[in-house]
Image (cartoon, grey):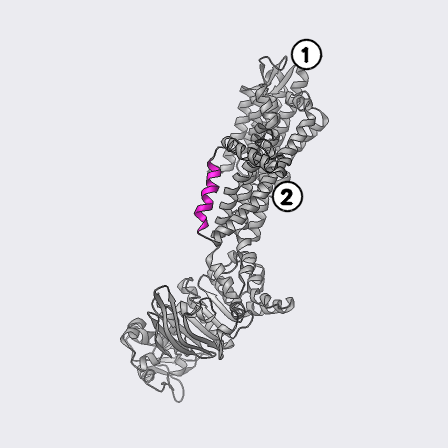
Amino acid sequence: MITLEGVTKQFGTVEAVRGVDATIREGEITVLIGPSGCGKSTLLRMINRMIEPSSGRISISGEDVRNTPPELLRRRIGYVIQNVGLFPHYTVFENISVVPRLLGWKRPRIEERVTELLDLMGLERSFAQKKPRELSGGEAQRVGVARALAANPPLLLMDEPFGAVDPQNRARLQTEFDRIQKQLRKTVVFVTHDVEEAIRLADRIAVMRDGRLVGHSSPEDFIRQSAPPFISEFLGADYSLNLLARHRLRDHYRPTRGTARGTGNPTLPETASVKEAVALLVTRQLRELTVHDEAGAVLGTFTLDCIKNLFGGESGGS
Amino acid sequence: MGTSIPRTDKAVFLGALIAALALSLSGFVTYRPNRIVRGQVLPAHEVLGNYYWVLLVLCLAVLLLTTIGRKRRRDGVMALLGGALGAGVVFFAGYAATELVSPETPFARTSMGAGVWLSLFGAYLITSESLRGYAGKRLYRTALQFPAPVAIVIMLALGWLNDLSLLQEFFNRRGTFFAELATHANLAFSAVALGSVVGFALALVISRLHFTHGFLFFFINLFQTIPTLSFLGLLMAPLIYLGTRFHFLGARGVTGIGWAPAFLVLFAYTLLPVTGNALAGFRMVDPMVVEAARGMGMTATQIFLKIRLPLALPVILSGIRTALTQAIGNTILAGLIGAGGMGAIIFLGLAQAAPDLILLGTLPVVFMALVADHFMKGLARMASAATGGGAE
C-alpha cells in the first residue's frame, strides 16, 4: 500500500503537484490520468524519489520513502518509461538482469529468472542474446516490462509505458499486461493520458488536474456517482460506452431454458465484450442477439435490458 | 537497381583509367646525370619497352571487369589486379633505374615520375574501391589489401629498388632517418596521449559545470585558429622566460626552440577534436537511457561507467583519431624549430631543392598517418559494435 499525504512539488514558482492525499491499494492497477502538464508524471516519479517532494510524505507499506537511500529504494521498485530506455550496448539478457546484478544475485539465479521472464512476456528464449536495435517497438516494450519485473518487486511504476507504440501493438500489449497482472497481482501505478487505456487496465482511476487529485475511484463509480463537470468532460461523452469493453458477455445475458433453437439473430461468443454486442445491436438495428459458448452451443440472449444495472449499483447479469 | 552501375564500379573504372592514361602519357621516370642538373623525363614505353604493355594490360583487364557487372569473385580478382599493378609499377621503376645507371655516371639519379605516382594512385583506387563492395569474408577482405604493400617491402629488402634516387637519399642518411622517424612518432603520439587525457578531462568538467563551456572553448578554439607557425613563434618568448627563470625546466630543454614549443603546439591542437567529440559523444547518449538507468537504481558512478562512457566511446575515439592524424602531419613543423622529426629531412630537401629528399621525409609521415588512422578506425568500429550503435 502506498500512502500519499499532502504531497506537493514546486519547480521554481510553478506548483506541479499540490497537496495530493491518496491511498494506492495493494495488488491493483491505479491509473493516474489527466491532461498533459497536470503533474501525473511528477507525482509518479516522487514515489521512487526520481523527484523529491517539496513537502508532504510518501510511504510504502507504512515506511517513509525518505528512510531509504534513493538507489536502494529504486532497486526494489519496478520502473517502466515511455521510450523504454533499453541500454543499447547491452543484450536483452543484460538489460533484464540489470537490477538483479545490482542486488548481487548469483549468475544461475539470474539466468533462471531471465528465462522465466522471457516466457512470461511471450518472447522467444533466443531473444536473450539480441541487442535492442534488433527488436521491434512492441518487443522492446516487452523487454522493458521484463526488466522492471526482474527482481520481482511488489511495486511497479509505469510512465506511459505503451505511449510510443502504434495503436494495434498498444492494444496487444495492454491485453498481455492485463493477463500478466492477473497472474502476478503487483501494485501498479500507471500514468497515461489515454482514457481508453485507463478503462482497459485500471482497477482504480485517479484523475489529476493542475497538480490536484480531483477524482479517485473505480472506473464504474465515475458514472454511478455523477462526476464533477471537469471529469466527465475529460473522460468524454463516450466514456460509458468504452466502459462496456471491460465487461464480457458471459456475465450479461439471459440464459435460454431448454434446448437451443435458431432464431436467425447474429451470434457472439460469451468471451466477446459487451461493447461489441452493443455495437452489433446498433449497426444491425436489432433488439437482441444470441450468445454461444466456445463449442458453439447457444447459451442465451443478450438485450440492452441485461446491462441496465451496470452503472446503477449492483452489476447486472444472469 | 537494374542497369545502374554501382558507385564502387565507377570508382574502380576511374582508377584503372587514371593508371592507363598516366602510364601512357606521363613521364615514368626522370633521369639526371647528377643531382643538380635538370632532368630528362622518360615515358614508360620508352624506358620499359615491351614491359609497358604488361602494365597496360593489367589496367585494361580491370576496365573490362568493371563492365561485366557484379559476378562471383570478380571484386576479389579486381583487387588482386590492382595489387599486381601497384607492385608492378614499383618493380619496373626500380628496374628502369637499374637499367639507366652505369659505372660511367656514378652520380646519376633516377627518380619516379608523375606516371609512377598517378598509376600507383590508380592502383590504390582499384584495390580499395573494389573491396568496398566485397561480399566475402572479412578476413579475405583484409588479406586482399596486402599483396602490393608486402611485395614492395620484399623488393625493398631484396635491394631491387636501390638504384632509385629515393633509396639513394635514404642510404645517404640512414642513421639520421630512423632517429628522426622515432623523434617524429614520439612527439606526435605523446602530444596526442596527453591531449586526449586533458581533453577528456575538460569535456567532463564542461559537462558537469556548464558555465565553463564558453570560457574553455574560447581557448580551445583560439588554439585551433592560430596558424601553426605563428603559434610556434608566439611561444618562443614565454618559453625562453620559463626556461631561464626555472632551472629545472631549463635543464630539461625548455626554451624557445626544440621539443618544448613543438610539443605544446601539438598538444594544444588535439584539444578541440578530443574535447569537442567527447562532449558530443556524451550529449548523444539518449537522456531516456540515463533516466532508465537512474530508475533501475544505478548510482551516479555506475551510470557514468556502465552507460554514458561506453555509449560515448565510439565518438570519443573518433575524436582521438582526428587528433592523431592531424598531429602526425603537423609534427613536420617541429623540423623548423630544431625539434627534429621528418620535418628536418623535408626542410633539408627544400633547402637543397632535392625533391627525392622531400619525398623521403614525406612518405613515412603519410604512411604513419594512414596506419594510425586505420588502427583508430578499427578501435572505434569495435567500440561501436560493442555499444550496439549503427554509426561509426
Q: Is residue B196 left or right of residue A257?
A: right
| Percent of width and height locating residue B277 | 50, 46
Q: Quadrant of residue A55?
A: bottom left
| Percent of width and height locating residue B279 | 49, 49
Q: Is residue B246 left or right of residue B234?
A: right
Query: Which disc number belongs to residue A55?
Result: none
Q: Amino acid at mark 2?
A: Leu
Residues behind callouts 2 and 1 on a single chain: yes
Q: Is residue A244 above or below residue B8?
A: below
Mark 2–mark 1 CB contact (< 8 Å) = no
User: Magenta-highlighted stretch: main secondary structure?
Assistant: helix
Query: Label 2 marks which chain's residue?
Result: B
Residue designated by label 1: B105
In terms of depth relative to the viewer, which is nearer, A318 or B367?
A: B367
Give the mark nearest the N terminus, 2 or 1. 1
| Percent of width and height locating residue B132 | 55, 39
| Percent of width and height locating residue B129 | 55, 36
- Residue A122 forms part of the magenta stretch: no
SS type, badge 2:
helix
Given the current orientation, which residue lies at the most extreme front position?
Answer: B245
Query: Label 1 marks which chain's residue?
Result: B
Q: Quadrant of residue B32?
A: top right
Q: Nearer the viewer, mark 2 or mark 1?
A: 1
Q: Is residue B17 above or below residue A155?
A: above
Which stretch is magenta? Answer: B211-225
Q: Residue at x 43, y 81 (%)?
A: A297
Badge 1 crowding class, 10 Å Cα cut-off, few under 14, some 14 to 19, many 20 or more, is few
SS type, badge 1:
loop
Residue designated by label 2: B139
